[in-house]
Amino acid sequence: MAWDRTWRCKKKSLTVKELTSAAEAVAEGYKGVQVNVEQEADDCITCFFLVPTEEDTENTFEISIYNLGRDGFVISLEAAAADNRLSDDADQLAEDLADQLEAVPLEL
């Protein structure tokens, strides 16, 4: 994956607790996947999905949710973040999270 992907969340508010529930629901859909959700800044919450590999290690896929104030929330999968560039797994996790949050793709 060589591009960044973004989605606009239709929700008017989104708490860390709500995002954690959505991210955990995504992780539960995949064997061995775990997720940690961190408030990284006042306007940014990041989900770190830990995905086991065949080599008994794990890849960390990072999906950030930015609060744009009146413009709402944007989900961002950045190709250069964490292990996102290594496989399409990051893309699938981001799409699943976007579905959980009722978000729609943005064309940038």
Image (spheres, helix red, strand yellow):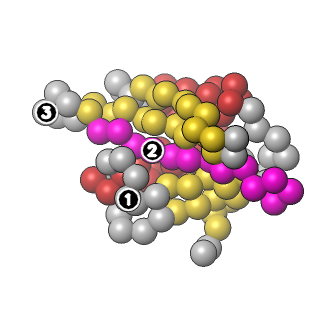
The answer to whether residue 35 of the structure is visible from this angle is yes
Q: CA distance from mark 2 to mark 1?
A: 10 Å
Q: Can residue 103 be seen at all in this image of the molecule?
A: no
77 sits left or right of 55 in the view: right
Determine whether the residue tagged by mark 1 lies in a helix, strand or loop: loop
Provide residue 34's location: percent of width, then percent of height.
Answer: 42, 26
- The residue where tag 2 is placed is 62
User: Could you tell which of marks 3 and 2 lies nearer the N-terminus?
Assistant: 3
Residue occupying the point 37% across, 32% down: 50
Drawn side of residue 57 relative to residue 91, left or right: left
Question: Secondary structure beneath disc 2?
Answer: strand
Mark linked to residue 80: 1
The C terminus lies in quadrant: bottom right
Please report the bounds of the magenta region as a residue range: 59-71
Q: Position of residue 92 (x, y in %)?
A: 45, 49
State the SS at label 3.
loop
Residue that label 3 marks: 55
Task: Return the residue nearer the eye: 108 or 40.
Answer: 40
Residue 101: x percent and y percent? 69, 43
- Disc 3 residue type (three-letter): Glu
Whether 62 is among the magenta residues is yes
Which residue is drawn at the image coordinates 51% and 46% (left, top)?
63
Labelled disc at residue 90: none
Q: Earlier in the sequence, mark 2 or mark 1?
A: 2
> Residue farthest to the left?
55
Name the image quarter holding residue 20: top right
**Residue placed most toward the observer, 20 or 89:** 20
